[in-house]
Image (tube, rainbow, N blue to C red):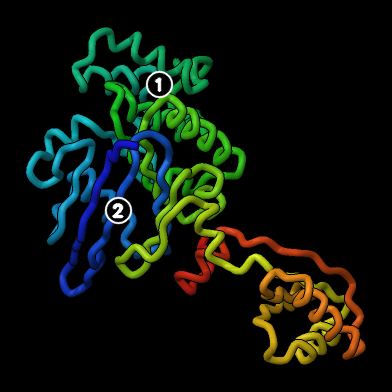
Amino acid sequence: MATTIEVRGLRKSFGAVEVLKGVNLEVERGGIFALLGSNGAGKTTTVKILATLLRADGGTAAVNGFDVAKDPAGVRRSISLTGQFAAVDEILTGRENLVMIARLRHLGNPRRVADDLLNRFGLADAADRRVSAYSGGMRRRLDIAMSLPGNPAVLFLDEPTTGLDPRARIEVWKTVKELAGNGTTVFLTTQYLEEAERLAGRIAILRGGRIVARGTPEELKARLPHGRVELRFARAEELRAALGALGGGYPAKPDEAALSVAVDTDGSAGQFADVLNRMEGAGVPVAGFSRKLPTLEDVFLAVTGKKEEA
């Protein structure tokens, strides 16, 4: 597929702090690409450089065929950016916000543009209400709708569901999927691993200013052992005894609150049986067991050493 964003050796420092240390990225045209990372990893800095709001200290970047340093005007004609916080005018109605943006983009028939977007985003019934009366999810959907007059080729969404409740987040997810389904390339940054797994076709993980992993969600999860077994116990002393029985033979991650331990094996029946035989040999009763497939959170922990922050 054609590449719509291409980044090579991107570097950026703020004073003595080097935020980006040679970032390399390729984003295919269409679909949803997610950039993951902890706070301070450089996600927003990357987006600002790609959106021509910051100048890189080194490296190159092109968006929709336009070099961000040599042809920023071409980039701006191709993109829209929705930041972490809604940029809507709360005094105006939803329709008035959209008409204003259509006029700023010098589009013909701004009211028709606004009405089309209100219908598309399920906001027609609230079109003439002030945005101050909108729910969080409605406000965020309007904010995304305001990015679309002119049909940008690329939409940057910088942590679009920060601060939203679960219902509002699901509303935004539906909207983002529909945008990608209609051909818009969506570049999403997020701390929510579930969000990336639900939405993105391809993911990159940023750590310490560098990309440390990339691929589809399935490709990333395939990097981890698929033979993880979860053992559950009735009492804390049984969990401690189980850890002793495992010894150093298997990597184990206990969860004292859940009275369980996740044991990494090679996925073979022999190792699975050996784990259970060790419990039986040590006289440790197992309340239950199950195979645990890798999650995107497991990948994130493996490559960054940090827990999901959201």
Q: Residue at x 25, y 66 (%)?
A: 19
Residue count near mark 2 (Cα–Cα under 10 Å), binned few <14, some 14–19, many ≥20: some
**Left or right: 279 with respect to 130?**
right
**Please, is residue 305 above or below residue 216 in the view?**
below
**Left or right: 172 with respect to 166?**
left
Q: Residue at x 67, y 61 (%)?
A: 293
**Please, is residue 76 above or below residue 263 in the view?**
above
In front: label 2 or label 1: 2
Q: Which mark is residue 199?
A: none
Q: Residue at x 27, y 43 (%)?
A: 5
Estimate the x, y position of residue 162 in percent, counting from the top left.
Answer: 47, 49
**Left or right: 153 with respect to 194?**
left
- Going by the numbered disc 1, the residue's amino acid type is Thr
Say whether residue 296 is visible.
Answer: yes
In the rendered image, which quarter is residue 287 located in? Answer: bottom right
In the rendered image, which quarter is residue 234 located in? Answer: bottom right
Q: Which residue is mark 1?
A: 93
Say whether residue 135 is visible.
Answer: no
Q: Which residue is mark 2?
A: 25
Estimate the x, y position of residue 114 in percent, counting from the top left.
Answer: 36, 15
Q: Which residue occupies the foreground of this view, 292 or 255?
A: 292
Q: Secondary structure at mark 2?
A: strand
- Going by the numbered disc 2, the residue's amino acid type is Leu
**Please, is residue 127 above or below residue 302 in the view?**
above
Q: Residue at x 27, y 57 (%)?
A: 24
**Left or right: 82 with respect to 133?**
left
Q: CA distance from mark 2 to mark 1?
A: 39 Å
Q: Secondary structure at mark 1?
A: loop
Q: Which residue occupies the foreground of this view, 2 or 242?
A: 2
